[in-house]
Image (tube, helix red, strand yellow):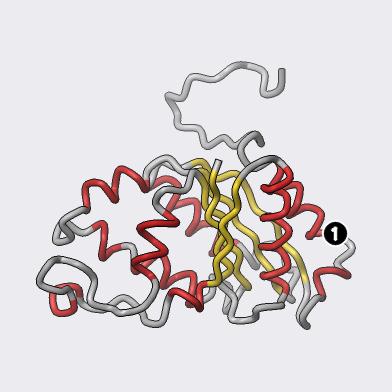
Amino acid sequence: MNVFVLCASPRRNGNSALLAHAAAEGLAEAGHKADLCFADDIVSAFLKDCRQCRRADGSCGIGDGYAEAFLTRFLPADGFIAATPIYWYGMSAQLKAFFDRSFCYVAASYPGSADVVEKMIGKRLGLLLSSEETFPTVSAGIVHQIQEYARYTRAAFAGVVHGYGNARGDVTRDPGAPLEAARAFGRDFFSRHASDYQIDTPRSGRMWA
């Protein structure tokens, strides 16, 4: 299986990057392909007005690496893992821009939108977080956004790994061992139990066999 791992922190050697690398290592250990990417390499601008920005052929008019990464790396992937620091109780601007920019290709004004929508549906999702604050709901806003994205795209949200730290490398000293957890998360990414029931979902009376 192929997983697109996006590190959405501006720090190349920060805590979010360490978590992303650990998850990628776990994926590789399990025999999966981990395609690790830094958001700053592909996103240089926020979403604009597509009616004014779109080129005559229907393609996005923003000239950075987003189109290549979204169309040839994200869409074909079976899974997507995002790593982000918590900024103002939300995801980084880079990660938000990654999601926002997908609108250029989902909108009907893009000639290949039907194919894009089909490929966005049903992926497996994961979230890696780093923050200095340990208050239990510090990540609630981000988790809710990813849950809603999973609902919207009929994806399976496999879970969250949260490491605590401020200075670069602090997560290596986190007694909760988030790097080990991120590595295990990568190894088990496609096999770990993930449930999001609806009222009419058929389900057994026993959760574990």
Picture quadrant of residue 89: bottom right
Q: Is residue 12 left or right of residue 153?
A: right
Disc 1 element: loop
Where is residue 142? Give x, y as percent.
Answer: 54, 63
Picture quadrant of residue 200: top left
Q: Residue at x 26, y 60 (%)?
A: 105
Query: In the depicted view, which residue is nearer to us: 92 or 22?
Result: 22
Q: Residue at x 41, y 73 (%)?
A: 97
Q: Residue at x 44, y 74 (%)?
A: 42
For label 1, the residue is 176
Where is residue 93? Give x, y as percent.
Answer: 48, 77
Where is residue 207? Give x, y as percent.
Answer: 67, 23
Query: In the depicted view, which residue is nearer to us: 209 or 20?
Result: 20
Q: Residue at x 18, y 60 (%)?
A: 110
Q: Is residue 155 left or right of residue 11?
A: left
Question: For the C terminus, which image quadrant?
Answer: top right
Q: Amino acid at mark 1?
A: Gly
